[in-house]
Image (cartoon, helix red, strand yellow):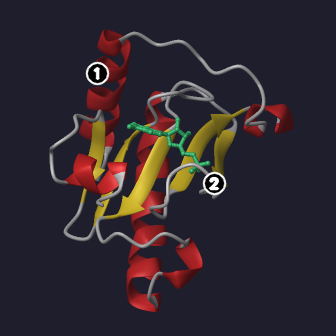
Amino acid sequence: MASIFTRIVNGEIPSYKVAESELCYAFLDINPLAKGHTLVIPKKEVDYLFDVEDELYAELMLFAKRVGKAIEKVVPCERIGVTVIGLEVPHAHVHLIPINALNDMNFAKPKVQMSSDELKTLASAIAETFV
Ligand code: 5GP
């Protein structure tokens, strides 16, 4: 069965899209650790990041860098934290999280509540800044 992220890429499930390339897709995390928390994925469904073939892996990381640069222009923060977990969704993804302190990367802390309108507006602002 297709992963939830493949279904997002295929438009079967809606997402707050931030950026897209031929091979990669970026969208806001639905349950964000911070405003601007974004997931960057290869469109090709591979469970474990380190099983992604080298060329696509490099493309994914370069794409994530461009997305991170766009996020930091829109969301005030010290920098963008980057992490990979993958215990919940078996489709490789990189978390990009605006942070100001170490604890901002703590996935055990309460998530930020954002309305659909807020997520939509934020995704559009990042998308407009993405180059
Ligand atoms: P991980 O697999 O890295 O442990 O966590 C998966 C992440 O994907 C979580 O931060 C979760 O909030 C996010 N997530 C799970 N399902 C969806 C979804 O349907 N849409 C979006 N935008 N994010 C999701």
Q: Nearer the viewer, residue 71 or 16?
A: 16
Q: Residue at x 78, y 32 (%)?
A: 108
Total number of numbered labels?
2
Q: Which mark is residue 120?
A: 1
Is label 2 within 8 A of ligand 1 (CB to nearest ligand atom)?
yes
Q: Residues within 10 Å of mark 2 (few under 14, many from 20)?
A: few
Where residue 41 appears, as percent x and y from the top left, is 40, 60
Residue at the left extreme, as displayed = 11
Residue 105 lies left or right of residue 103; in this view the side is: left
Q: Amino acid at mark 1?
A: Lys
Q: Residue at x 46, y 59 (%)?
A: 64
Where residue 109 appears, as percent x and y from the top left, is 77, 25
Q: Nearer the viewer, residue 87 or 77?
A: 87
Q: Quadrant where the N terminus lies?
A: bottom left
Q: Residue at x 36, y 21 (%)?
A: 119
**Earlier residue among tags 1 and 2:** 2
Q: On the image, numbered disc 2 is attached to which residue?
A: 87
| On screen, residue 110 above or below 68 | above
